[in-house]
Each structure stands twice: as structure tokens, then as C-alpha cells.
Amino acid sequence: MDKFTITTELTNRVLAYLGSKPYAETHELIEAIQREYQLEESRSRSMFADVKEVDFKDDNYEESDQEKFSKHSLTSQASKAKKAKNIE
């Protein structure tokens, strides 16, 4: 069976119309629409469940002097604190 897409608003209007008709005449159509919707929802969820975190850092990225200084400064401070702690 070929697939096509309709808006949620239109789907809800069709379901509301079908809901106003006798149950015996429309319940199979309503259930089929609901099944298709649930199937599509589960496909969407499983598709995004497989997405892994991506590292967006550019391979050509170079740290600025400020970033290098900040890292060096923090490392130096941590090292000094560790040495001071060992002396006490």
C-alpha cells in the first residue's frame, strides 16, 4: 500500500467526522488510522534512539592563546594545590 502524509489537523477532523457516524460503519477505519499513527510514532522514536552524540569540534580547530593560557593556568593551580596538600 502506498503511503502519503496528511496534517494532524486534517486527520483529527476526519476522525471527528467518522466519530459522528454509527460505530459499526466506521470503527474499522478509525482503528486503522490509529494503528498507522502508532506505527509511525514508534518508527520515529526508534530512528532517533539510534542517534549517537556527535563531536562538532572542527578537525582544523586550534586553541587560541587565551584557551591555552587558561588550561595551563588551571593545571598549574591544581598542581600547586596538590603539592601544598602533600606538604601539610
Image (cartoon, grey):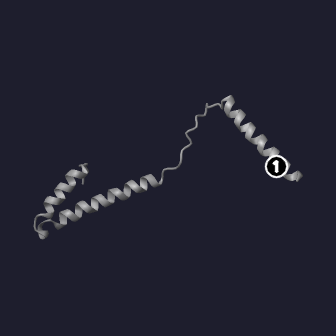
Disc 1 element: helix
Nearest the eye: 56 or 71 = 71
How far from the left and from the top, in percent, is residue 73?
75, 37
How far from the left and from the top, in percent, is residue 15?
18, 59
Residue 75 location, quadrant? top right
Residue at 23% x, 62% y: name it: 32
Nearest the eye: 87 or 60 = 87
Residue at 37% x, 59% y: name it: 42
Residue 35 in view of the camera: yes
- Amino acid residing under circle 1: Lys
Q: Pointer 1: what residue? A: 82
Residue at 14% x, 61% y: name it: 18
Residue 54 location, quadrant? top right
Relative to 59, is 44 on the left or the right? left
How far from the left and from the top, in percent, is residue 84?
85, 48
Location of residue 67 with respect to 47 vertically, above or below: above
Relative to 39, is 6 on the left or the right? left
Location of residue 70 with respect to 44 vertically, above or below: above
- Residue farthest toward the right in the current orientation of the protein: 87
